[in-house]
């Protein structure tokens, strides 16, 4: 394979190096995957306005997200089972993000635990939380996040019921992997992955096992999810969590302007326009298509971020032009992690930063804070 110059190159490498069941977990959506595809495809419908004969010197991608300084307006999104893309995946991704100067968000459904990531890193990271029936379990997670020094809590609102992902069911996904002939073959054809996994003790759900009983693989996780993920989730639960957390709070999973207005009333610091990577409600609009209406509704009341479909620095720029103050990458960094570990995550970030910087210059701007709809060419919403 030739040099790595775009995220798609990292995706191809990861496909070759990660067992199929775990690669498919990251690279899949719910049901027909129409929303999953739209998340990326709709960025291509947005065209940029080229400007010439403008001063392009002294450019900067630096800004803030929820008041925290970032090297560029990009954070690593929470992704479950990151540690099954590469051994110690959450730790490696957190290190790469810290070195680059952007936030890393640890999923509740991570392989490496809060404590393991905190012990291995020097800078604070963010933690993503689900609302569950067992309030004692939530209290414990929040306290563990505080003890780990997490600098923001990302509360996911769109996973009260788990969407069906056909690839996971067909692959019989589990963590650690099952040892059926199919799974053994998948791992045997990825010897580098196996060697790395042999060198770590992090092979199951680090935030759950030992804290929630009976969770060891996908089937038991699904049973626990059906029992514990609270379908009665309401806006009053956010007040309860906000009080116990006491720090910066971000609400993830907003896709409707009315919900955005309700979210703004909670006193949270930011919302993330997201459809869970197309993994929940198939047939919902892409995140980038939903962004403009939400920014118009609440952009002057609460910080608006975007998650979903970003594969390039140009995608980041388009989201910023439409009013997002920050963006998140999930699969883009996961492909880098699966391809080359920590170095691959760094390369993914370098690619996005270079593309964002170059595109910003060619659009006639020198700082990300100056980007607006004026930088889009005859914008029509996807």
Image: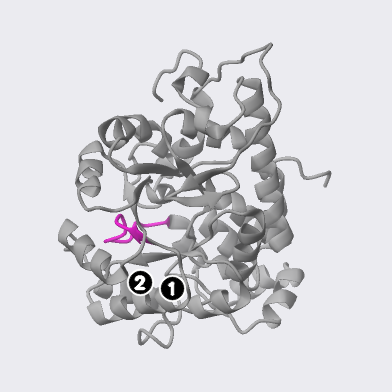
Element at label 2: helix
Colour scheme: one colour
Q: Position of residue 298 (x, y in %)?
A: 27, 37
Check if mark 1's residue and mark 2's residue have beta carbons within 8 Å: yes
Q: Position of residue 198 (x, y in %)?
A: 69, 82
Element at label 1: helix
Q: Please state which of residues 8 and 76 is positioned toward the viewer in this rendering.
A: 76
- Furthest-right residue in this view: 2
Q: Position of residue 63 (x, y in %)?
A: 53, 42
Q: Position of residue 207 (x, y in %)?
A: 44, 78
For residue 265, the mark is none
Magenta run includes residue 164: yes
Where is mark 2, residue-wise? 222
* Whether residue 365 is situated above or below residue 181 in the rendered picture: above
Which residues lie in the magenta part? 154-165
- Disc 1 packing (10 Å; few <14; some 14–19; many ≥20): some
* Whether residue 31 is situated above or below residue 359 in the rendered picture: below
Where is mark 1, residue-wise? 218
Q: Is residue 142 left or right of residue 379?
A: left
Q: Is residue 360 left or right of residue 113?
A: right
Q: Residue at x 57, y 64 (%)?
A: 22
**Main SS of residues in magenta:** loop
User: Is residue 153 visible to us here?
Assistant: yes
Q: Quadrant of residue 9?
A: top right
Magenta run includes residue 72: no
């Amino acid at each position: 394979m030739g040099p790595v110059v775009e995220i798609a190159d990292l995706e191809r490498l990861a496909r070759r190096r990660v067992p199929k069941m775990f690669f498919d977990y990251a690279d899949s959506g719910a049901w027909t995957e129409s929303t999953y595809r739209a998340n990326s495809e709709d960025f291509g419908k947005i065209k940029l306005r080229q400007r010439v004969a403008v001063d392009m010197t002294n450019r900067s991608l630096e800004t803030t997200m929820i008041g925290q300084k970032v090297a560029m307006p990009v954070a690593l999104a929470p992704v479950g089972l990151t540690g099954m893309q590469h051994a110690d995946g959450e730790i490696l991704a957190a290190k790469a993000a810290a070195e680059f100067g952007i936030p890393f968000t640890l999923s509740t459904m991570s392989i490496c635990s809060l404590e393991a990531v905190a012990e291995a890193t020097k800078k604070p990271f963010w933690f993503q939380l689900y609302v569950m029936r067992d309030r004692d379990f939530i209290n414990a997670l929040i306290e563990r996040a505080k003890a780990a020094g997490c600098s923001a809590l990302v509360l996911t609102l769109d996973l009260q019921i788990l969407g069906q992902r056909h690839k996971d069911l067909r692959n019989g996904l589990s963590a650690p992997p099952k040892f059926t002939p199919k799974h053994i073959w998948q791992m045997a054809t990825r010897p580098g992955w196996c060697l790395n996994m042999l060198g770590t003790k992090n092979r199951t759900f680090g935030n759950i096992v030992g804290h929630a009983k009976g969770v060891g693989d996908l089937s038991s996780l699904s049973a626990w999810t059906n029992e514990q993920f609270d379908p009665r989730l309401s806006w009053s639960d956010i007040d309860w969590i906000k009080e116990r957390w006491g720090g910066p709070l971000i609400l993830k999973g907003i896709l409707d302007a009315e919900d955005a207005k309700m979210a703004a009333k909670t006193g949270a610091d930011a919302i993330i326009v997201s459809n869970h990577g197309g993994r929940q409600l198939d047939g919902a609009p892409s995140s980038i298509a939903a962004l403009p209406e939400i920014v118009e509704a609440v952009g002057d009341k609460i910080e608006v971020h975007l998650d979903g479909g970003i594969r390039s620095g140009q995608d980041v720029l388009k989201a910023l032009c439409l009013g997002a103050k920050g963006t998140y990458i999930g699969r883009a960094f996961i492909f880098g992690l699966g391809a080359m570990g920590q170095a691959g995550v760094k390369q993914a970030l370098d690619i996005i930063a270079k593309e964002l910087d170059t595109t910003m210059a060619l659009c006639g701007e020198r700082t990300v804070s100056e980007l607006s709809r004026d930088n889009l060419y005859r914008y029509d919403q996807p």
